[in-house]
């Protein structure tokens, strides 16, 4: 199977040369195959979210290389990295960042309103994405009227609006209970099975780590175990 994501001896350092110097991740090398779910595990401050930001092209490594497919994206220009992030990567955040006054459809359509796609077409695509995560009964409900599990599904649908090759989720189960976590994980598994995308999840939740196809455990910015 082809490799979707590879990091090669990656370091990320903040405040280099000052008394606040921090090596957030240190010499990390991992490979993630296409169409799999990989979990980054470890305690708070272990470097999980930093690796996600490197893979998601939100930041560059201080040393080392990041590859998406065969492309060494850490060396690309910022303009190209932004274009690649917009076209190829979806994000699910711990906080959904949804707009309460808008409907589920309007929230999910928002990413496409920054493109040359019309509002009516963006909302048509958004409805399709919401239906794919079993939200057809809440298309025109405002976000403020939705339950916690429904909010997670809206967040997932929004992350899929650009048909990403890679889906990144940062602590997606942090604010929901066990039943909703199971529902979330089943939804993500169905997306992988149906669409073949690669999912990378950062979490310290044992349920999430057990559910993933492979897990990379970190401590103090270093990789301590691959499973």
Image: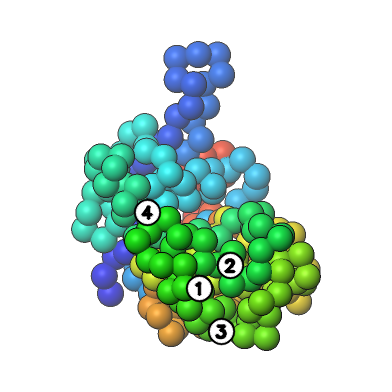
Q: Nearer the viewer, mark 4 or mark 1?
A: 1
Determine the residue positioned at 31% across, 54% down.
84
Rendered view: 217 above or below 109: above
Left or right, 109 with respect to 99, comes to: left
Q: Secondary structure at mark 3?
A: helix
State the residue in front, 96 or 62. 96
Of pointers 2 and 4, the one earlier in the residue sequence:
4
List the residue tagged with mark 1.
Answer: 123
Left or right, 201 with respect to 193, comes to: right
Q: Nearer the viewer, mark 2 or mark 4?
A: 2
Of pointers 3 and 1, the one earlier in the residue sequence:
1
Q: Which mark is residue 131?
A: 3
Q: Secondary structure at mark 4?
A: helix
Determine the residue positioned at 64% across, 58% down.
98
Classify residue 106 by image quadrant: bottom right
Q: Which mark is residue 106?
A: 2
Is residue 206 at least partly visible in the picture? Answer: no
Q: CA distance from mark 2 to mark 4?
A: 22 Å
Coloration mode: rainbow
Q: Which mark is residue 85?
A: 4
State the residue in front, 121 or 18. 121
Rendered view: 30 above or below 126: above
Q: Secondary structure at mark 2?
A: helix
Verify CB contact (< 8 Å) between mark 2 and mark 1: yes
């Amino acid at each position: 199977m082809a490799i979707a994501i590879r990091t090669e001896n990656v370091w990320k350092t903040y405040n280099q040369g000052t008394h606040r110097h921090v090596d957030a991740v240190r010499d990390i090398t991992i490979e993630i195959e296409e169409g799999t779910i990989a979990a980054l595990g470890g305690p708070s401050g272990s470097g999980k979210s930093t690796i996600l930001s490197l893979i998601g092209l939100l930041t560059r490594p201080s040393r080392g290389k990041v590859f998406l497919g065969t492309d060494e994206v850490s060396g690309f220009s910022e303009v190209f990295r932004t274009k690649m992030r917009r076209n190829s990567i979806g994000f699910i955040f711990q906080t959904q960042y949804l707009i309460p006054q808008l409907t589920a459809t309007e929230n999910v359509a928002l990413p496409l309103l920054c493109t040359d796609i019309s509002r009516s077409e963006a909302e048509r695509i958004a409805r399709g994405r919401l239906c794919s995560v079993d939200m057809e009964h809440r298309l025109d409900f405002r976000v403020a009227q939705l339950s916690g599990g429904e909010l997670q599904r809206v967040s997932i649908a929004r992350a899929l609006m650009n048909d990403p090759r890679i889906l990144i989720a940062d602590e997606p189960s942090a604010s929901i209970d066990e039943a909703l976590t199971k529902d979330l994980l089943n939804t993500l598994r169905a997306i992988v099975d149906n669409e073949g995308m690669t999912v990378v999840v950062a979490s310290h939740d044992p349920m999430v780590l057990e559910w993933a196809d492979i897990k990379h455990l970190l401590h103090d910015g270093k990789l301590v175990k691959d499973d």
